[in-house]
Amino acid sequence: MSVVIVNPSSAGGSTGEEWPQIASELRSQFGAFRPLFTRKRGDAATLASEAARKGAKFIIACGGDGTVSEVANGILSSGKDVELGILPSGTGGDFRRTLEIPSQTRAAAKVLRIGRTVKIDVGRVSFVDHKGNEAMRYFVGVASCGMSTQVIERVKSENVSFASSLLQTAMRTSPTRLAVQLDDSHERHLHVLNLCVANARYFGGGMKIAPDAKLTDGKFDVVGVGDLSALKLFTSAPRVYLGSHLSMPEVSHALARKVSVRSADRNLEVALEIDGELPGRLPATFQIVPGALRIRVNC
């Protein structure tokens, strides 16, 4: 039987409140399943790993991008050949946008039943956690550093929208000096508002930050947003949401299988964002893992 890992706290707690209706629509469109509920951060990865080791072949993540990422990490860490499904019920929904999975429960449940299975790349990143220890995790969407970490921190702490947090943060943000190495090239120093290492196309609640990213090309899209004034950042925001910003002179774009990033200022700690979560800081090394995860997508 398929397993559904439910984050009742996602979407501001509405997933838990609406679970009876979500479950009813999932059963009618998909069939029988066994629900498992998270209680705290990290539970989804643990539950997914345990379910995979116990023989589950299809594990569905019900929640937002953080829940999807945790379930993917649990599957990958188990070493088992398990397929991932997505039942969107969260705030951002960036990864399901790349996969073109509907946000409505009934339509998403139908994709889980009749969709096709594909193998996608994932990112593997080593970094420094909040305790100062070296850590490693996988990501399916986008990892970033710079202004995005402050935006997400404000979203989580002040319960505001991504757009509102972006406007507030832009007024107070200054560029960060980073040392970046792509594959075996020489390390370069960049002065950026934000740097994204993208496996998927969207992040930040619908920004099409890496419009050319493909989940099956074996490469990251590395997008750097340079030193823009707050005014130009505001006026350019529509271009970022539409994905037409790569032609801007302040924006850089490159492809790489491996990306190493550190703060160019030894006295400055730079926070790291991974699939919408803030697990630690730089230095970080990102490596693409081609075709590592099976996932159910829209036909």
Image (cartoon, rainbow, N blue to C red):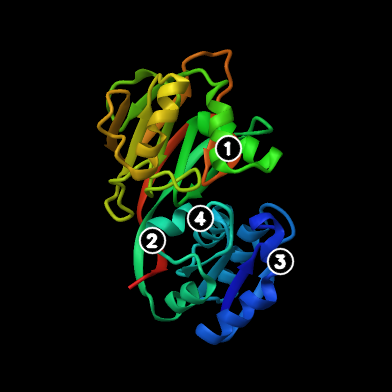
Q: Name the amino acid, label 1.
A: Ser
State the residue position of label 4. 93
Callout 2: helix, strand or loop?
A: helix
Q: Earlier in the sequence, mark 1 or mark 3?
A: 3
Q: Is residue 5 left or right of residue 68?
A: right
Q: Earlier in the sequence, mark 1 or mark 2?
A: 2
Callout 3: helix, strand or loop?
A: helix
Mark 1 to mark 4 CA distance (whole Å):
17 Å
Mark 2 to mark 3 CA distance (whole Å):
24 Å
Can residue 17 be seen? Answer: yes
Mark 1 to mark 3 CA distance (whole Å):
25 Å
Callout 4: helix, strand or loop?
A: loop
**Horizontal and vertical percent position of residue 135:** 58, 39
Q: Earlier in the sequence, mark 3 or mark 4?
A: 3
State the residue position of label 1. 164
Which is in the foreground here, disc 1 or disc 4? 1
Q: Name the amino acid, label 4.
A: Gly
Mark 3 to mark 4 CA distance (whole Å):
17 Å
- Point out which mark residue 16 bears: 3
**Horizontal and vertical percent position of residue 165:** 58, 35
Callout 1: helix, strand or loop?
A: helix
State the residue position of label 2. 99
**Horizontal and vertical percent position of residue 156:** 66, 42
